[in-house]
Each structure stands twice: as C-alpha cells, then as structure tokens.
Amino acid sequence: MPKAFLVDLSRCTACRGCQIACKQWHKLPAEKTKNMGSYQNPQDLSFVTYKLVRYTEREMDDGVKWLFFPEQCRHCIDPPCKGMADDYDERAIIQDADTGAVIFTEFSRKIDDLSPEELCPYNIPRRDPVTGIWGKCDMCLDRVQNGLLPACVQSCPTGTMHFGERDEMLELAEKRLAELKKTYPDAQLMDPDDVSTIYLSIYPPSWYYEFATASVTRPKTMTRAQALAKIFPGLKRRVG
C-alpha cells in the first residue's frame, strides 16, 4: 500500500533533528553557511540538502512568533514532475509502485531547461551544477523497504513527524485536525488529496512559506516540450 508522511506543524520546535538525520543517512556533505539574521541555515534546499527547516518571523496580535516549516518533497500521488520529465526521458523520474515514492534517477540530467519551480509546484528539486542530475528527498526508500522509518521521522523528538500507510496517516491527520480546530480555527491539512507528505498547519499555509501548498494561481511557464506536445499530441521530445 502507498505510504505517507504526516507533519504536524503545531509540534515543531525547529530542533532540526530531521534536517541533520537526512544529511547523515544520505551521506550528504555540509554546506557553507553564514548568519543571515535567522536561525535558518542553509537558506534554501539544494542538491545536497533534501530537508530544510524554514523559519518565518510573523507579527501577530499576541506578539511576534516564529513559524517553523520542515520542508521536503511531497511525493505527489500523481507527480507533475514526472509528467514533465517524461518528455525528456521516461527513466528520469520513477514512482515506486509499492510506496508511491517519487525518485529522481541519473537520467534526470536530461532535464536541462527547466527551473525547479517549473518542474515542481512546490519548488522542491534542485540540480547539481556539476553533473546536471536533479536531487531531492527519496522517502528514505532503502530504509522503508527494509521495515525502517525514514531517517527524519526516526529522529523527531516532538511527535511532529509520522510515517505509515497512507490511509492510517490520513485518519491520524483528521483526528489531530479536529483537536487543533478547537483552539486554532485556521488549522488545516495542506493538499491532502494530492500528496503523500501531508502537512497540518495551525495558521494559513502562506504564513509558513510561499510554496507550502500548490497554488493554482501561481504563474507557470510553458516549456518548449509542453508547447510541442500541445501542437503535436503524443509527440515525445527526442533526447540524444
């Protein structure tokens, strides 16, 4: 059965345990950082940073608050990135049949004329400037296939992150949402019907991050491959 994450933002303290655990498990190098006036570091996702806890300072009626958003790939049920990548090479992005994990392969280097925002409505994947290969969270597929939790979930000390069968995570999400609604009327699930990384927020999603949800109003650019496909239905981009 497909798997899913539940990320309960009401419990996140920005300890960044998930961010570090992701680095350790995937053996990803550290990045050079500097003080930018926020505890958020690095400042953005990259080919070697799959998980990033974003910090947003927001002034509210009861004072200034930090909102924390542990960002990662949403592992969409019907991944738009794969639809785009198939125009370049159908091997570039695959979706694991058992878990639903969306995986970028070495063939993703052929996707050479798109920005992260054009490829993904959540602005997630990043391209290695040296090899050209794209990278992002892979759901710790190797761990999951061996009966283990994803590294980020395993490391979370506050109960922010959960992982399991998708129907069980949705049930847990709805139960937790009902509890939070009593105190936080704006509490909601972010795109629960479309993704396998389901965020539960207590404030409007846009307060956390611009790409917290897949906004249908955000402008998108039609790529050359899309334009050709529109003109010649069924035509695949030929890649050498």
Image (cartoon, rainbow, N blue to C red):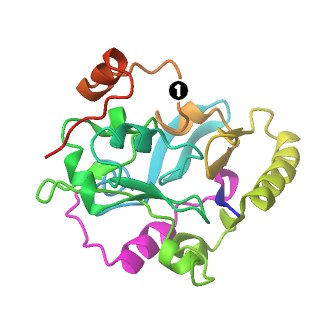
Please name whichever residue, 177 or 75, is drawn nearer the observer in this view of the structure: 75
At x 32% / y 53%, what residue is drawn?
A: 92
At x 32% / y 29%, what residue is drawn?
A: 235
Whether residue 53 is situated above or below residue 79 in the rendered picture: below
Left or right of residue 205, residue 132 in this image:
left
Left or right of residue 112, residue 217 in this image:
right
Are there few (<14), some (14-19), or many (20+) residues within 10 Å of tag 1? Answer: few
Task: Say whether residue 222 is visible.
Answer: no
Secondary element at image label 1? loop
Query: Is residue 15 one of those drawn in magenta?
Result: yes
The image shows a total of numbered marks equal to 1
Image location of residue 38, percent across then percent down: 37, 50
Task: Say whether residue 148 is visible.
Answer: yes
Q: Which residues are magenta?
A: 7-36
Left or right of residue 108, residue 18 in this image:
right
Q: Amino acid at mark 1?
A: Ser
Image location of residue 23, percent across then percent down: 37, 73
Query: Is residue 64 one of those drawn in magenta?
Result: no
Please name whichever residue, 12 or 49, is drawn nearer the observer in this view of the structure: 49
For mark 1, what is the residue?
A: 215
